[in-house]
Amino acid sequence: VMSMGQLYALVTPNEETATGLAGLSVILSVCLMGFLITSSAMPEGWLWAYWANMFRYILQGLVTNELAGQDYFLDLSALVPDFDPKDLDLGFIGKMILRKIIEFLERGLQLPGEVILYYFGWAVFDEENLEFSAPYKWHYSVTAVAVFLVGIEAIKLLAVNFIVWTKR
């Protein structure tokens, strides 16, 4: 992010323009990095911003490193109603269904980290093995961020050599 700030300072004519451009780019980057708006929910014309967003790769690397290969327990016991199904006049089938729902809520839900990653578009579902996997590990994200930083540094070098805002 600091490298991008330096880039804006080098390519704009004054401090106010650089500050405004940096603020706007950070807001757009955060909105389009795939966490606030998932890639599947983005308008088609904005998908390029998702793929060309350095913040996306930073977040994806951190989240994938944390979630991949881990199971998380979702405690649903707070949703269990405060009554006994036997007291209700639901008939045999209704009481059995309600009892099964209450048992499910009391047990909770075991959720693999890959399911969470799949929601954000950072994991895939293998239909052959019927399982989720996260193929984009942290090294993929680190490589993408490194490519972005090399590109930004190259543009900064060109800006220092070729952009002159002062008049002589």
Image (cartoon, rainbow, N blue to C red):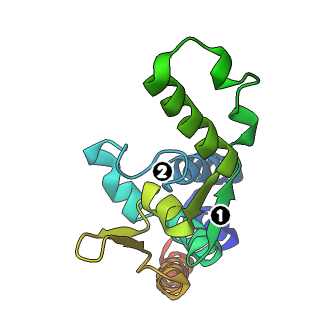
Image coordinates of residue 35 in percent, x first then y, are: 54, 52
Instruction: Report the quarter where the C terminus lies.
Output: bottom right
> For mark 1, does the 10 Å Cα neighbourhood hold few (<14), some (14 to 19), or many (20 or more) residues?
few
On the image, the x and y values in percent for residue 117 come to: 49, 63
Residue 76 higher or lower than 50, as above or below: above
Near-viewer residue (71 or 144): 71
Residue 80 position (above or below residue 122):
above
Quadrant for residue 55, please give it. Answer: bottom right
Residue 43 lies, in percent from the top left, at 31, 41
Amino acid type indicated by mark 2: Leu
Q: Nearer the viewer, residue 138 or 17?
A: 138
- Mark 1 belongs to which amino acid? Tyr
Picture quadrant where residue 73 is located: bottom right
Per the image, the residue denoted by label 2 is: 32
Q: Which disc, if any, is residue 137?
A: none
Q: Of residues 150 and 6, which is closer to you in this image?
A: 150
Instruction: Report the residue marked by disc 1.
Output: 72
162 vs 63: above or below: below
Q: Is residue 124 above or below residue 156?
A: above
Q: Nearer the viewer, mark 2 or mark 1?
A: 1
Residue at x 59% of width, y 46% of height? 27
Q: Is residue 46 left or right of residue 155?
A: left
Residue 165 appears in the figure: no
Is residue 66 visible in the rendered structure shown here? Answer: yes
What residue is rendered at 67% in x and 16% in y? 87
- Residue at 65% x, 63% y is 72
The quarter in which the N terminus is drawn is bottom right
Report the residue at 53% width, 25% height from top: 95
Q: Which circle's residue, 2 or 1, is located before the other in the chain? A: 2
Q: CA distance from mark 2 to mark 1?
A: 27 Å
Q: Secondary structure at mark 1?
A: strand
Residue 135 x/y as whole percent: 41, 80
